[in-house]
Amino acid sequence: MIDALHFIRPLWLLAIPAVALTWWLVRRRDASQARVGNFVAPHLREVLTVNRHARRGLRAVDGVAITLLAAALAAAGPAWNKQASPWYSETAPLIVAIEVSDSMRSNDFQPTRLDRARFKVRDLVAARTGSRTALIAYAGSAHIVVPPSTDLAVLQPFLESLDPAIMPAPGSAADRVLPLAKTLLGDRAAGGTLLFVNDGFDAADVAPLAEFAAREDSPSLVALVVGTDDGGVALLPDGSPVMADGGGRLDTRIDASLLRRVGSEAGVAVIRATTGDADIRQLTRTIQSNLRLADDPDAKWRDQGWWFLWPAALLSLLWFRRGWTMQW
């Protein structure tokens, strides 16, 4: 942040030395008057010298000077980050990689995790009108379903048709998605976002995700995790539970500690799905903040001068302190 700090209207900074000089001259005058008072007889000094003790403490000129300095800094427009232009934000490429595994049949999110994931993807895409969006489906293997397109009507039928039964290999190999996403984004990978819509990751995914995220030409990684920590029951279309390879019902619990590892070690922005639209709003903000704004010629610096207006306003209240508007 410090490296990017600059001022949008730097000419206002010229007011700072003027304020400082005025403050120094007033304070010097007060000091001179105090020295003159030293030649007055001690028994008359207390009577003849006005506000003698007040000059030793904070004066009105001090408050005014600080207020004017804060106002000058605010007017200069300090800025340390940029905001994307609306066009650039909306058209940033997005790759949605949705997990289509048996654990996504779990009913802890009604009707199932996979159904809720479809709803979330549909809502997110609808909020990004005009953007390029691609769809990848993965389980034990990953496959491109829809290449990047601005025609969002194309994505809907493919999204609805996704089912664990059509996936050629069982599992949840998120690392298989990475090379496909890089291929789809091409030379715009650094400005795009790869969004995993799943019910968590495997421990084996952490290292490849971290390695992928460390590359300068990689897209930003985000995950919308659908499901609860306690899990639910994964049901087949006939109503029978999905069985694990080792026997017993498939464990659909979500490992929250592993999600934290994915966030801290692999740099994935993990967002938990909600029953409302709070997660979609957070996803939209995260995707926009992931933009490489330096590549956007229309990106504008965000004016942060309002931070200095609050202390200026509070200090201006000192004007109403008794006697201060009269004594300088």
Image: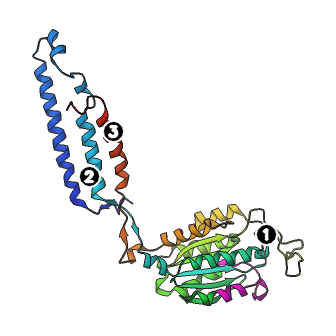
Say which residue label 2 marks.
Answer: 72
**Residue at the image position 46 percent from the left and 76 percent from the top:** 89
Query: Which amino acid, mark 2?
Result: Ala
Q: Position of residue 185 (x, y in %)?
A: 52, 85
Q: Position of residue 137 (x, y in %)?
A: 67, 84
| CA distance separating discs 2 and 1 | 58 Å
Q: Position of residue 136 (x, y in %)?
A: 64, 84
- The first of marks 1 and 3 along the sequence is 1
- The first of marks 2 and 1 along the sequence is 2
Cβ atoms under marks 1 and 3 closer than 8 Å: no
Query: Which amino acid, mark 3?
Result: Leu
Say what secondary structure mark 1 lies in: loop
**Residue at the image position 52 percent from the left and 68 percent from the top:** 285
Q: Is residue 206 visible?
A: no
Quadrant in the picture for residue 326: top left
Say which residue label 1 marks.
Answer: 252
| CA distance separating discs 3 and 2 | 18 Å
- The first of marks 3 and 2 along the sequence is 2
Magenta span: 156-174
Mark 1 burial class by Cα count in 10 Å: few <14, some 14-19, many 20+: many
Which quadrant, please, contains the C terminus?
Answer: top left
The circle drawn on residue 122 is none
Residue 290 versus residue 238 in the image, above or below: above
Query: Which amino acid, mark 1?
Result: Thr
Toward the top, the furthest residue is 43
Which quadrant, please, contains the N terminus?
Answer: bottom left
Say what secondary structure mark 2 lies in: helix
Q: How has the structure been colored for display?
A: rainbow
Say which residue label 3 marks.
Answer: 317
